[in-house]
Each structure stands twice: as C-alpha cells, then as structure tokens.
Amino acid sequence: MSDRIFGGFGLALAIFYIWAASIIKDSFMVDVVGPRAFPYIVGTIIALCSLYFILRPDDEPEWPHMREFTEIVFAAAVMFAYCFALPELGFVISTIFATAYLTWRLGTAPLWSFVVGLGTSVGIYVVFHLILGLALAEGPLGF
Amino acid sequence: MDTLALLADGFAIALTPQNLFLAVMGCFLGTLMGALPGLGPANGVAILIPIAFSLGLGPVASLILLVSVYYGAMYGGRISSILLNIPGDEPAMMTCLDGYPMAQQGKAGEALSLSGVASFVGAFFATCGLVILAPQLVKVALLFGPAEYFVLFTVAFATLGGISSTNQAKSAFAAALGLGIAMIGSDSQTGSQRFTFDHIHLYDGIDFLIAIVGLFALSEVFIFLEHHRGGAVGSAKATKVGRIMPDFAMIKRCIPSMARGTGLGFFSGVLPGAGASLGSFLAYSLEKQTVDRDGKTFGKGDPRGVAAPEAGNNAASGGALVPMLALGVPGSGTTAVLLAVLLQLNITPGPLLFQKNPDVVWGLIASLFIANFILLAMNIPLVGIFTRVLMVPTRILMPIVAMISFVGIYSITGSSFDVMLMVGFGIMGWVLRKLDVSLVPVILGILLGNQMEVNLRRAMTISDGDWLILVGSPLAIILWGVAITGFVLPMLMGRRMKKRMEAARNEEEFVGD
C-alpha cells in the first residue's frame, strides 16, 4: 500500500513538474531543443516509474509506530524552529536548545541534556568560529 | 615515464607541511567516522565539504583533506565490524564474517592489525592501478563528443542501482528526481528561469551541498531518533583489543588472499555500478571457494576471511576513483560525494582535467599514496584510540553531527532559508530510505543534471535537431548497450544476489551467537 501511495504522489509530482515545465518562458536566446525538452523527459520518467509503483508495489516497509512517528515530526519541527531562531537569537543560544532537545530525545536525562547542549554549542563555537574562523549566525549578544 | 614525472610533481605538492598536516588530520577524522556505525565515508565527507570550503583552503589542499577522510573512513569501517559485529559502513559487512569470531577467540588485536595491513595492500595497489589506468581511460574519453557524453551519463544512472538492486524502477525514479531538482534555477543555455516560481532564493538553483548533507547526514539522525538508539555501541569489555602487533607468520599466510582480494576489488571499483560493497563480497566469496571449499574454517575466524574482503573493499575504493577522475562519472555514493567536492571547487573532472590541471590530479594521487602510509602507521599502533570512540554514546554524538551539518551549510550560504531546505532534504531522505529508494542516484542526478542536459543540447545543436545523433556513432551504440545491460541485468538476477549477500550475513550471525 505504501508503494501505491508513493506512486500516486510521484504521479502528481510528475504532472505538476511537466505543467511547470510547460510554462517556462523563452528568453531572447534560443537553441534547437530549448529549455523545456529535458524537463519533459525527466517528468515522463518520474510518471512511468510512479505507474510501476502503483501496479507492482513492493512489500510493505516497516513504518514506525505512532510514537516514533511523532518523535520524527517533533525533531523536524525543532530543526525548523532552529533555522528561524538562528538569525534572532544567534548561534550559541539556539544551538544549546536544539542540541539539548535532540540528546534528550535520544535518551539523555533532562538536566544532563542541557549540559550536553551547552558543551556542544560552546565547543563548536570555539572550534569552528574562534579557531577556524567560520562565519556563524550572530545574535543580539554578538554570538 | 611521463606519468612518473607528473607523479613526482604531485608528491612535491602533497609533501608541503600544510598539506601533510591536512592529510594526517583527514586520515584521523576519516578513521574516526568510518569506525562509527551510521557515519560512513559518504556522510563523513559530505559533512566536511562545506567546512573545508568555508575555511578557504585551496583546491589541492581541500582535496587532500577530503580524500584522506575518504580513505580513512574506508579503513575505519572494519573496526566495529571486528569488535562488535556491526559494520561501520556497508562495505565492511563482509569483514564481520570472520573478524568477529576472531575477536571472540581473543584475537581482536591480531584481526585489527591484519585487516589494517590488508587495507593498506588493497588501497596501495589500487592507487597504483589508478596511476596506470586513468591516463589510458582519458585517451578514450577524448574521443567522446557531446552525444557520447550524454549516453555515458545515462550509463552511470542505469548502472548505479548496482547488481544487487531489487527494484530498478526505484533507482530510475531516484535518478529522475535528482535530475528534476537539478533543473531548478536559471537555464545555463538560454537564461530562462525554470521552476523558480519567482522565488528569489531559487534563482541560482539548489546548491548540491545542501541536498547532500540533508539527504545523507540529517536523514541518518532521523533514523537514530526513530529507533531511539541512544546508547553507546561498544562497551569497555567488547572493545578490549589485546595484543596489537601483527603476527608476521599470519600476514605471510594471507598474502595470496590479499592479492586476489585486491585484484577483484579494484575491478569491481572501476566497473560502473559495482562499488566497494560488491568488491568485498566477491573477494570473500572467491577466497572461500579457493581455499576453503568444504566450509571448515571460513566464518569461524579464519584470518584469510578477514584479509580478502578488507583488501577488496579498499582496492575498490581506489578503483572507483578511475572513472570519477578520468570521465567525471562516479560509480558509487562516496565517489559522487567526491565529485561534489571537485564541482564545489570549480574543477570539472574528466579528460580535460588531466590536461588543464595536472597539479590537481597528480597532487591528489600523490596524497592518496601518502594517506595510505599515514593510515597504516595510524591504524596499527593507535587502533586502541579508535576503539574508544565506540564507547561514546550516540545520544551525544548524533546531535553533534546534526549541529556540525547545520554549521557547515550556514557558513557557506549564510541564509537560514538554505538551512531549512537542508532539513527538508533530511526528511525527504528519511521517507525515501523507508521506501527503499536509494539516495545515491538522487545525489548523482543533482550533481550531473545540468551537465547531462548541456551535452544533450550541444549534441542536438550539432545535428540540428536530429535525435538520431544519440545513436550516431559506434561508441555511442556500445555505451547504450552497456546502459541497457546494466539496467536489465539486476532485474533478472538482483534478487538472487541480494539474497546471497544477506544469507552470508545471517549465517554469520548464527555462528556469532
């Protein structure tokens, strides 16, 4: 069943892709095949493979249970929140919280998670920013 | 002789103090990453590319650092195979079969040093093979026109699923997905905006590094979260290695095994669609058939069963560099990541690279030789340090990996939109993995998509719109033949190969328990 849903999704993607390719505007420069031909080929392959998934699905993969699934969704949400927080709070503060969350979910005790977060964040800041000179996000406090 | 002179120049470049230091660092980090289950050579190199790039190292220096990581990870993969029966990366799977029983008999140190020597032999002779074979392949590649190149890229995609692939439609889907992503951004030929929907962040296309780090490194973090695998993989007891120095009599006995493993491994590395996993599998199977027909000692801790696959796996990783450097077409996930390194440095591999930037090519090859010696020196006496790494719990390690991925991407793009895109790729990678869709063709599609299209359009311009130019030369027809065979063959025998590989592994687990 998963493969069928995947195939349906792939088919929708292919249709969308081919439609999006058909509205590519020509510029003043032109060549023989133009900018649309290759995307059409790619879209067709995606469509054909998707049809195959619908007709001949593989065995069902092992999907995680509801609990693990929420785990993944929350982790992804935390990572997205981290991206929003980076320019606002700066690297060090955002990273403390993001790392603490991830290590907590992987089984570190809550208080220790904070310590691990602090250690990781400061460690990366020192090694990559202070020693190696990489540009990291700067917050209102300058780090 | 010409080759030797060029190689000598390469050594002059690679032996500067800075480059030597980078090689040592790369070997160390690589072995560390290879040893950790879940962080293979592809992930390791992927995470480090943006960092090496934003450090502002020159092309040769970055390459030296990253290929040292690549070779190091190939060496490191065996450590957890032997000590814990968990392969550190996929090609190290076959090393579990005899390495773990050896460790259980209290010969862990010997197994580790023997496999270190075997890795060295495999990688060293494969690098020699690279020196000999790559310039020859370049001569062939110079005959290629745009149409042949287009077909060559098709060969790469058709064979990438590999002989053990069970569902070729999924490989094809993955490749098309990657190619589709590569199309986003302004068209290199006419400048038309494609698939950008007037979104300013998409005008330059999607940086392939974002996709690579997201698909490889972040999806691994999600897998760990899903399984709550937070504990340390090793314990103090399991990581005791005992006597470390190799037993010379044992090594001497294993020389023929290493030689066979190296030869087989090298060829499966060079061939499209085979790669290191198949190299070590073939080396082990052949060795078993040659020296142990009745199955008396293999699987029960025979040192030859450690030496052969280890030599095979490392020889394959050297062999895989041949098509990558000479044609610009990688045959495996890890070499795809190395191709990303080159593209990021604005170096296009292929025949012209050997003519235009001989310093890069030969500096790279020389540093492979140096990396080999460093790794041999590092792996035999210092193996104890690397086994300690297995005791760091993954609940601390994986968040660090995630954060370093974020740091790398942020430091090259400086935009939180791109970092979000990386998280998106991480989620996509997790879903695709669950559905058993290989991620390597996606990466390769993103990397090669634009070149593939450019070659198609150039060919069409030459032929003035006649599609028959794609089958217009004997070379192109041969390449089509390879592509079709490579795509169809796994449909006929993929399931059987996969079963055999899994059967070998299960048998071992039974013996191990």
Image (cartoon, coloured by chain):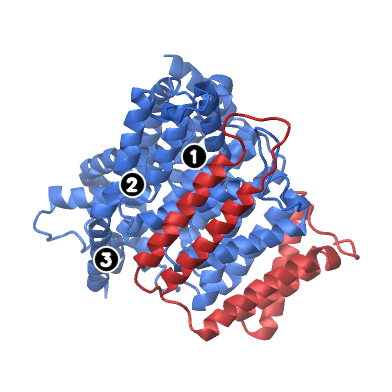
Chain colours: A red, B blue
Pointer 1 or 3: first along the chain: 3
Disc 2 with disc 1 on a shared chain: yes
Inter-mark Cα distance, 2 to 3:
37 Å
Inter-mark Cα distance, 2 to 1:
35 Å
What kind of element bears circle 1? Answer: helix
Chain of the residue under the numbered disc 2 shown in the image: B
Q: Residue at x 71, y 77 (%)?
A: A115
For disc 3, the marked residue is: B101
Indicate the position of residue B222 as horizontal and vertical percent values: 55, 70
Inter-mark Cα distance, 1 to 3:
30 Å
Q: Nearer the viewer, residue B337 or A60?
A: A60
- Residue B142 appears left or right of B487: right
Q: How many marks?
A: 3
Q: Nearer the viewer, residue B331 or B262?
A: B331
Pointer 2 or 1: first along the chain: 1
Residue that lies at the very extreme toward the right in this rendered image:
A140
Indicate the position of residue B88 as horizontal and vertical percent values: 43, 60
Residue that lies at the very extreme toward the left in this rendered image:
B294
Q: Residue at x 48, y 79 (%)?
A: A64
Q: Nearer the viewer, residue A23 or B64?
A: A23
- Mark 3: give few (<14), some (14-19) or many (20+) Cα within 10 Å: many
Amino acid beneath label 3: Pro
Indicate the quadrant where residue A98 lies: bottom right
Chain of the residue under the numbered disc 1 shown in the image: B
What kind of element bears circle 2? Answer: helix
Amino acid beneath label 2: Phe
For the residues labelled 1 and 3, say whether their Cβ atoms are less than 8 Å apart.
Answer: no
Residue B369 visible in rendering: no
For disc 1, the marked residue is: B371
Q: Which mark is residue B487?
A: 2
